Image (tube, rainbow, N blue to C red):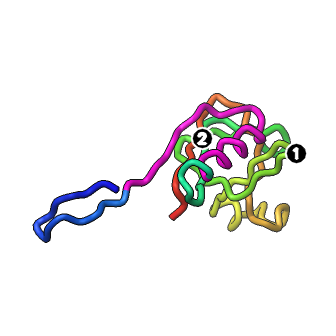
Amino acid sequence: MVRARSRFGEEPMRVSESVVLPLPRRVQMMVLAALLFVQQYGVGVKIEMRGQAQGKGQRVHVLREWGEVGALDMELDLLGLKDPEYAAGENYDEEEDGLRWVNPTGPGEYRLSERT
């Protein structure tokens, strides 16, 4: 536990862990990293990615900002990205869950952090 001094005295300060890794071509590697993160730190994990991914119809998506991963499909090797614009747009009826399903093609990176 880290202690921080404030004008009110010494108080415990919470430290949050996160790690950024190169975007793998296989979703299974992200799942393994997330499981190890949970095991190491004993907290829930939030997965985010940025970089290049391939969507429906061979469409390439470039995420310049971190996008949260809402679901992982190891069988189809796909990430379900939470995308409010996609869920509210014209394509919503295509995906009942409101997730933008993509295949991570890279280059890019993903971040594991504590779910708050």
Distance from the alpha carbon under mark 1 to that under mark 2: 19 Å
Give the residue drawn at x 59%, y 41%.
110
For marks 1 and 2, the one nearer the N-term is 1
Residue at x-position 64% and y-position 28% = 107
Q: Kindly state the secondary structure of the residue where label 1 is placed.
A: loop
SS at badge 2: strand
Query: Where residue 110 is drawn, which disc sits there?
Result: 2
Q: In the rendered view, does 79 fall on the left or right side of 22?
A: right
Q: Which residue is mark 1?
A: 76
Tag shown at residue 109: none
- Residue 26 inside the magenta-drawn segment: yes
From the top left corner, tell me how far across and down residue 27 is, in percent. 76, 41
Three-letter amino acid code at disc 1?
Leu
Above-or-below relation of 40 to 44:
above
Q: Residue at x 73, y 37 (%)?
A: 29
Whether residue 47 is visible = no
Magenta stretch in the rendered image: 15-38
When the figure is inspected, residue 51 is found, relative to residue 7, above or below; the finding is above
Please provide percent x and percent y for residue 43.
56, 59
Q: Nearer the viewer, residue 40 or 81?
A: 40
